[in-house]
Amino acid sequence: MSLKILLKGQHHFMSQNGFEVLGVSSNGQELDDVQNEEGIRVVNIEMTRTIAPLKDVKSLWNFYKLCKKEKPTMVHSHTPKAGIVGMLGAKLAGVPIRLHTVAGLPLMEAKGVKRKILDFVEKLTYTSATKVYPNSKGLYDFILQHKFVDKKKLKIIGNGSSNGIDTDFFSAKQISEEKEIQLKRELQISDEDFVFVFVGRLVGDKGINELVEAFSKLSVSSSGVENSKLLLVGPLEAELDPLADKTLQEIETNPNIISVGYQQDVRPYFAVSDCLTFPSYREGFPNVVMQAGAMGLPSIVSDVNGCNEIIEKGKNGTIIPVKDSNAIYNAMQRMMDDEIFYEQLKVNARKMIIARYEQSLVWNALLEEYNTLLKGKEYAV
């Protein structure tokens, strides 16, 4: 899924600019899609998302063998599990350039023994890498503060983000008026409704419990009773980070909360919405916030890495404290009630994304970094 969605287009771009690209991830339809859509070779190496020592050692061994066979000049890993497998396996196999992008740290919310394990794995990943790319300034500072790696190994590519945003694809112009009308009819959204949208996994770490609590209060208040909707776009992941029973019940029974599950194309759902609400506990550099902005939506985001860089308070959205349902409620209420404030944010939303995070800017910055490393200017084994 990360190869297919989070890094969409990047593999093809690099293959058109002098690189032979080999995509490695766990098996699945998405891996086949990457091969077909990006025009690159792919290899299946099973990796779990959970802490599973025996399976992780097997993944490491298989990746080490792959490196010995393919003899790559460069390995670039994304996500925590692929990071430790990719960086340690590549180092053991003697791969000269080993790059790891940090796009979020699960350890931020971990405690006790689990936190110690995750800290150790993160440090081992960075030690094994020759370069580490936090995809936001907040992550860069966090890594330095916790002394995970020496500053000389760290670098932010461009203005942040792992892949930038295709602003031609994520554009309100791509969704016809007929499509909007049809989707509103299907979802029972009226033209008078103010629609808040969340896009992502429906899990605790994304702030869904607080979001649903805040919206429930909003939807029964005198000003919000008939003209606000909360649109939830994304899958439930009960096995990893389940929502509170109270939250699940509210989603099920509140007629103003519309949950549509995972959607292949989220653009129509942005098109029928007025504001993104994204109260996540932790992020790297969230694509969803860039996507919403490119679609012309202002955002309510929590004060966490990435979110507080994409959004500038009072310019293209507003920033609230983490895990604070009252703050979410107040921000939602203002978006609905203060028309001048809302329109000001809306006007800036798309143009601020284009100026800083257009995909071509990110890809070309990364290509320049690759070529610099290959020329030996920052070569380190």
Image: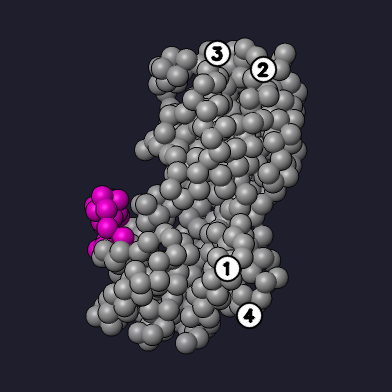
Instruction: Using the numbered discs, state the Cα–Cα distance from disc 1 to disc 3 in whole angstroms.
Output: 51 Å
Q: Nearer the viewer, mark 2 or mark 4?
A: 2
Instruction: Using the numbered discs, state the Cα–Cα distance from disc 3 to disc 2 in whole angstroms.
Output: 19 Å
- Quadrant of the rendered structure where residue 223 is? top right
Check residue 113 in the rendering and tell me which mark sits there, or answer none: 1
Residue 159 visible, this angle: no
Give whichever of discs 4 and 3 has the lower sequence position: 4
Check residue 150 in the rendering and tell me which mark sits there, or answer none: 4
Q: Are marks 1 and 2 in contact (CB under 8 Å)?
A: no
Q: Amino acid at mark 1?
A: Val
Residue at the spot 62% in from the left edge and 49% down from the top edge: 281
Residue at the spot 45% in from the left edge and 43% down from the top edge: 238
User: Could you say which is closer to the camera, residue 306 or residue 207?
Assistant: 207
Q: Is residue 34 magenta?
A: yes
Residue at the spot 55% in from the left edge and 65% down from the top edge: 114
Give whichever of discs 3 and 2 has the lower sequence position: 3
Q: Are marks 2 and 4 in contact (CB under 8 Å)?
A: no
Q: Amino acid at mark 4?
A: Asp
Instruction: Provide the residue designation for mark 2.
Output: 220
Q: Residues within 10 Å of mark 4 (few under 14, many from 20)?
A: few
Q: Nearer the viewer, mark 1 or mark 3?
A: 1
The image shows residue 310, relative to residue 217, as above or below, that is: below
Badge 3 element: loop
Badge 4 element: loop
> What range is drawn magenta here?
26-42
Give whichever of discs 1 and 2 has the lower sequence position: 1
Q: Amino acid at mark 3?
A: Asp
Residue 69, given in percent of the width and then of the height, sits at 24, 80
Residue at the spot 53% in from the left edge and 35% down from the top edge: 245
Residue 313 visible, this angle: yes
Instruction: Using the numbered discs, state the Cα–Cα distance from disc 2 to disc 4 in whole angstroms.
Output: 52 Å
Q: Is residue 177 magenta?
A: no
